[in-house]
Amino acid sequence: MRIAHIITRLILGGAQENAVLCCEDLMREYGDQVLLITGPPLGPEGSLLDRVRAGGVPVELIDSLRRPIHPWRDLASYRRIKRALRDFRPDVVHTHSAKGGILGRAAAWSLGTPAVVHTVHGAPFHPYQGRGARAVFRACERWAAQRCHAMVSVADAMTELMVGAGVAPREKFTTVYSGMEVEPFLHSAQYRDRVRRQLGYRPEHVVIGKIARLFHLKGHQYLIRAAEQLVSAEPSVRFLLVGDGGLRQRLCRQIAEAGLEDHFHLTGLVSPEKIPELIGAMDIVVHASLREGLARVLPQALIAGKPVVSYNVDGAREVVISRRTGYLLPPESVKEMAAALNELVIDPALRDRLGSEGRRRFTETFRHERMTGRLRALYAELLADHRILKAES
């Protein structure tokens, strides 16, 4: 097959890793011809461009393709995407992210691409937006949904959200969990002692980790407030925040004002290859985001054998099973988070039991080869339908 993937930017993030792994698998495992169309990876979140190029995936970099809405740049991006697709002549166009998804679907549909697919990693409309913005984004998604043949959700919760918002009918959706390289997480324990020494942790410290951009709606402020309650009861607890972003100074100020500087360590930006090592050094993983399709860190932590504490948003409930693989809490709750973390801090056997159950349940589910196989089967089905319709016409 000839397959073009389109994504707004290749920062270090779940949707981006998903797209890159799929491109690599399609080339390596199936011998497909692949083109990855993207904008520049601007911002403090890091870049996957070097990895993509090192892996031999052909890339079309469109400088005007940016995340913020900008009519003139967006029109230029649409024309560049359309030109790239016309030159590449794909059988399949698979889009990701809001901007890349809308422009990419419009361009592919206008060219009569046989199969156009869009993955919903997270809805661009959510309750934390203003009512007007939410209505505009919802309308844009409805419009774009009419310009693709199938939509892929990274969690059943995404399908429910999009169907409930009237974006597209249920039969247009297929759930395919995001894939990842599971082996490094299965063997993350081998890094534990070395990484903990490097970070200055002693054997008696119980390390609670959070892996997320330091960005709005990622919920770091709730973890810091829960830490105030937890540290007073359990002084041996430590918090490891992995990631960088625009809220770093504000969060550091909140930590200092709470008198928790000795209990928090911020790593800053780290490469994806370092994530298994850092999870291996943790005892508990927290996910406090207020919106996310299905955060990769949840299955990553569980595959590494770590219990998770997460707010009950979007797809989290599909892997965080209360008192079986972790704790599922009301969004924005602080007292409940402190209580759940306290139970895990004082009970190592409970941590082991929940983490082991998560590893047993989800290791095979999240292998990237499984994801790519299911996506390619969808492509084949859509192309077969296209050939049948073409023959009938």
Image: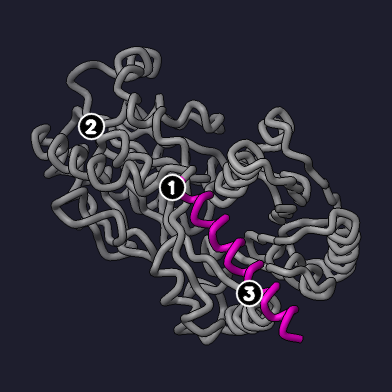
Task: Identify the amino acid type marked 1.
Answer: Arg
- Kindly report the secondary structure that dominates the magenta region of the rendered protein: helix
Q: Disc 2 or disc 1, which is closer to the eye?
A: 1
Residue bearing mark 1: 296
Cβ atoms under marks 1 and 3 closer than 8 Å:
no
Separation of residues labelled 2 and 3 (CA atoms): 57 Å
- In front here: 23 or 231? 23
Separation of residues labelled 2 and 1 (CA atoms): 24 Å
User: Mark 2 or mark 3, which has the lower sequence index?
Assistant: 2
Residue 313 occupies quadrant: bottom left
Which label was assigned to residue 352? none
Separation of residues labelled 1 and 3 (CA atoms): 32 Å
Percent x, y of residue 302: 29, 41
Crowd band around label 1 with a 10 angstrom C-alpha radius: few (<14), some (14–19), many (20+): many
**Is 300 positioned to the left or the right of 129 in the image?**
left
Tell me what residue is drawn at x 85 percent, y 66 percent: 78
User: Mark 1 or mark 3, which has the lower sequence index?
Assistant: 1
Task: Identify the amino acid type marked 3.
Answer: Asp
Element assignment for label 1: loop
Tell me what residue is drawn at x 48 percent, y 43 percent: 368
Which label was assigned to residue 385? 3
Percent x, y of residue 201: 30, 19
User: Mark 2 or mark 1, which has the lower sequence index?
Assistant: 2
Task: Tell me if I can see residue 292 in this picture.
Answer: no
Element assignment for label 3: helix
Percent x, y of residue 163: 47, 82
Percent x, y of residue 54: 71, 28
Which label was assigned to residue 237? 2
Look at the image and give the residue range highlighted in magenta.
370-393
